[in-house]
C-alpha cells in the first residue's frame, strides 16, 4: 500500500502560523473511523490515512483561541502528500483585551468626523478624542471597521464614502447611524453603473423617527459588503451604515453555519473578514486567552 500524508497549513488572518496546539479530528466517510490528533506548532504532516479511492474524510479543527473550522470532504491522493490550508478567525469569546490605535494616529477623515459628532446617543457633548476614548471596545471596533471600509470605498468622482459622512448620531458594534448629504445617496446610486454598488434590501433597516426610506445599496464584495441604507425627511438625509459578513465565515473560513446561527454580527468577526479577504486592516489587534 502506497504511503500517503496529509499536510496541514494552519494560519491566522494575517497569514501567520497558529502558535497553539489545536485539536484535529478526522473521520473517514468510508469506514467511519475517527482519528483525533493534538496538532502542535511546527507540525505539518499527518500519517495513518488511506489514499484514493478510500481516502475520503471529514476534518474538524478546533484551536483554543480561534473558531472551529470544518471541511466536510477532503480527498486524499492515491499516494504522496495531499496539502490543505486553513485560515482561522479569532473567537471573540476568547479575546482578553484589544489594542486600539491612539486617537492621533487615526485617519484624518475619521478624526474630523469624530470632532463634528457632539450628539452621539449616550455620548452627548463628547467629541473628538473624548468621544473616541469614551467608547467601549465593541463600539470602537465597529467604528474602526466601518471607517476603514468606507475609506476604501471610492466613488467615480474620486471621493471616498467616509469623506461624505457629516456627523455620527449613534454607534453600535455592528453599524453606525449618521447625518449625510443627499450627494452621498446620489453618488452611491450613480456608482451602480460602474459596478461599485448594487441595490439592496432595505426592509431590515428602520428609519429614524420622522424619516422615510430612500433606498439601500451594497458593495459587490464577495465577503464583507458595505451597506448604505438611506432615509430622508425633506432635504435632510441620514444613513444606517454597516458591514455584512455575507456568508464569509461559512464559506471563506469554513466555520460551521450552525456554530454561528442566531448570533449577531460581531465586530471582531468583521475585523477578521476585512483582513483576510480584502487586506483592509482596521488598525486594532487582539490579545487572546
Image (cartoon, rainbow, N blue to C red):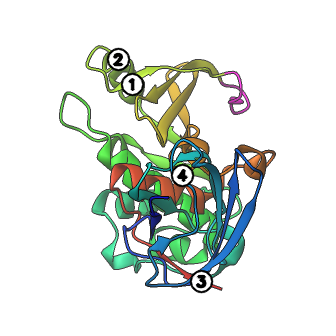
Tag shown at residue 197: 1
Q: Nearer the viewer, residue 80 or 167?
A: 80
Q: Is residue 205 magenta?
A: yes
Q: Position of residue 102 (x, y in %)?
A: 40, 80
* Residue where numbered disc 4 is placed: 253
Q: Position of residue 39 (x, y in %)?
A: 57, 78
* Distance (Cα) linking label 3 and label 1: 42 Å
Q: Nearer the viewer, residue 98 or 64?
A: 64
Label 3 or label 1, whichever comes before in sequence order: 3
The range drawn in magenta is 203-211
Residue drawn at x 70%, y 45% as measured from the top left: 29
Does 206 sit above or below residue 29? above
Does 63 sit above or below residue 21? above
Instruction: Determine whether, in the image, residue 198 is placed left or right of residue 192.
Output: right
Instruction: Give SS at disc 2.
Output: loop
Residue drawn at x 56%, y 37% as measured from the top left: 246
Does 60 sit above or below residue 220? below
Instruction: Give SS at disc 4.
Output: loop
Residue contact at pointers 2 and 1, CB within 8 angstroms:
yes
* Residue where numbered disc 2 is placed: 192
Q: Nearer the viewer, residue 149 or 12?
A: 12
Looking at the rendered image, the disc whose residue lies closer to the viewer, 3 or 4, is 3
- How many numbered markers are drawn? 4
Label 2 or label 1, whichever comes before in sequence order: 2
* Distance (Cα) linking label 3 and label 4: 19 Å
* Residue where numbered disc 3 is placed: 21
In this view, which residue lies farthest toward the front? Answer: 1
Amino acid at each position: 500500500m502506497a504511503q500517503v500524508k496529509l499536510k496541514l497549513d494552519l494560519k491566522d488572518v494575517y497569514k501567520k502560523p497558529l502558535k497553539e496546539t489545536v485539536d484535529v479530528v478526522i473521520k473517514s466517510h468510508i469506514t467511519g473511523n475517527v482519528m483525533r490528533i493534538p496538532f502542535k506548532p511546527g507540525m505539518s504532516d499527518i500519517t495513518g490515512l488511506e489514499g484514493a479511492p478510500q481516502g475520503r474524510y471529514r476534518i474538524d479543527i478546533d484551536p483554543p483561541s480561534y473558531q472551529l473550522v470544518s471541511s466536510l470532504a477532503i480527498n486524499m491522493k492515491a499516494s504522496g502528500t495531499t496539502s490543505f490550508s486553513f485560515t482561522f478567525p479569532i473567537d471573540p469569546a476568547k479575546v482578553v483585551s484589544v489594542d486600539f490605535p491612539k486617537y492621533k494616529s487615526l485617519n484624518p477623515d475619521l478624526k474630523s468626523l469624530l470632532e463634528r459628532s457632539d450628539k452621539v446617543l449616550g455620548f452627548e457633548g463628547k467629541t473628538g478624542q473624548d468621544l473616541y476614548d469614551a467608547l467601549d471596545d465593541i463600539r470602537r471596533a465597529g467604528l474602526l471597521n466601518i471607517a476603514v471600509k468606507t475609506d476604501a470605498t471610492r466613488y467615480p468622482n474620486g471621493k471616498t464614502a467616509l469623506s461624505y459622512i457629516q456627523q455620527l448620531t449613534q454607534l453600535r458594534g455592528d453599524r453606525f447611524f449618521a447625518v449625510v448629504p443627499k450627494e452621498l445617496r446620489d453618488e452611491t446610486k450613480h456608482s451602480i453603473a460602474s459596478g461599485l454598488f448594487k441595490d439592496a434590501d432595505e426592509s431590515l433597516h428602520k428609519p429614524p423617527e420622522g424619516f422615510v426610506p430612500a433606498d439601500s445599496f451594497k458593495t459587490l464584495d464577495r465577503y464583507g459588503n458595505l451597506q448604505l441604507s438611506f432615509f430622508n425627511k425633506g432635504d435632510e438625509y441620514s444613513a444606517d451604515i454597516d458591514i455584512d459578513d455575507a456568508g464569509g465565515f461559512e464559506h471563506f473560513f469554513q466555520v460551521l453555519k450552525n456554530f454561528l446561527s442566531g448570533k449577531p454580527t460581531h465586530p471582531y468577526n468583521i475585523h477578521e473578514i476585512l483582513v483576510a479577504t480584502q487586506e483592509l486592516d482596521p488598525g486594532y489587534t487582539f490579545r487572546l486567552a
